[in-house]
Amino acid sequence: MLRLSNIYKTFNKGTINEKKALNGIDLELEDGDFVTVIGGNGAGKSTLMNIVAGTFAPDCGSVEIDGDDITLMSEHRRAKYLGRVFQDPIMGTAAGMQIIENLALANRRGKFRGLLPGIRKKEKEEYANLLKTLELGLESRLTTKVELLSGGQRQALTLLMATLKKPKLLLLDEHTAALDPKTAKKVLDLTNKVVLESNLTTLMITHNMNDAIAYGNRLIMLCDGRIIYDVKGEEKKNLTVQDLLKKFEQTTGEALVNDKMLLSNN
């Protein structure tokens, strides 16, 4: 469903601030794969996500989704293939619009928009039923503006919007990092439920090694813009945080120094 071939990306090339973010990334995701991505600061996780989304263009290499080469496709055009949930709960929704209006926008993604009535009664019922699955009471708040929701409520809504029209690829960019632990767990469990029930091909960046192990069927670790570890199936299920730390040290010759990652695994 996703194929990255020989992807390189360097920022500020030729200056004293030159940073090689990705160094020859080759990655393939099969249909239905749920892949978690971990790595230290500057490992290339966010750059990888942004290359797939079209926010950045690679210096060389190719990006394919479901057999279509989208390497040169603009970010807004490739949105028809993708669903994305960002780290910041403020992103991904139109804050000044109602919950029902946000859902309607998501439902019309890629469709022709004419002059017919905006949201019909049948649609309202469908959206209320969808919101009920979140178990957050939002089905009775259809006309509430999104800016009045909590961070967890907004992330849950954003996840629903990102998957309303089943995307070929779902991108989760540390989408629970800004939430408190209890809310983050609820959003992650909801994510897992949505991904499995809809068999969504998913790429999820996380700084939490426990979450990287607990969710998904495959895990990749990045360091200096390269994939240094790729594990799946039963081997992944049996991993521990200590295994990941040991693997990082064996591969790079140095200990993982990343307070954000280490503190999240206490």
Image (cartoon, grey):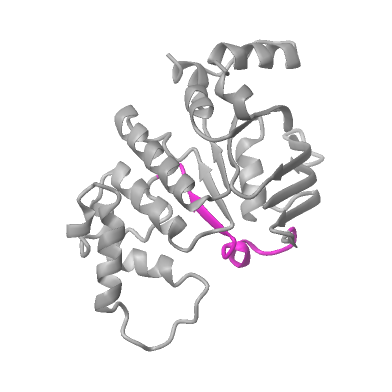
Stretch of the chain drawn in magenta: 71-88
Figure label count: 0
Residue 113 vertical position relative to residue 219 in the rendered view, above or below: below
Residue at 68 percent across and 50 percent down: it is 2
Figure quadrant of residue 184? top left
Front residue of 237/43: it is: 237
Q: Is residue 86 magenta?
A: yes
Looking at the picture, tell me which residue is in the foreground, 49 or 240: 240
Q: Residue furthest bottom?
A: 115
Q: Is residue 241 magenta?
A: no
Residue 177: x %, y % from top left: 43, 34
Residue at 28% from the left image edge and 79% from the top image edge: 120
Res. 69 visible in picture: yes
User: Which x, y percent locates residue 114?
Assistant: 43, 87
Viewer-closest of 262 and 162: 162
Q: Classify 127 as above or below 25.
A: below
Could you say which quadrant of the image residue 27 lies in?
A: top right
Residue 244 screen position, x and y as percent = 61, 17
Residue at the left extreme, as displayed: 140
Task: Judge whether residue 12 can be spotted in this image.
Answer: no
Q: Residue at x 35, y 48 (%)?
A: 156
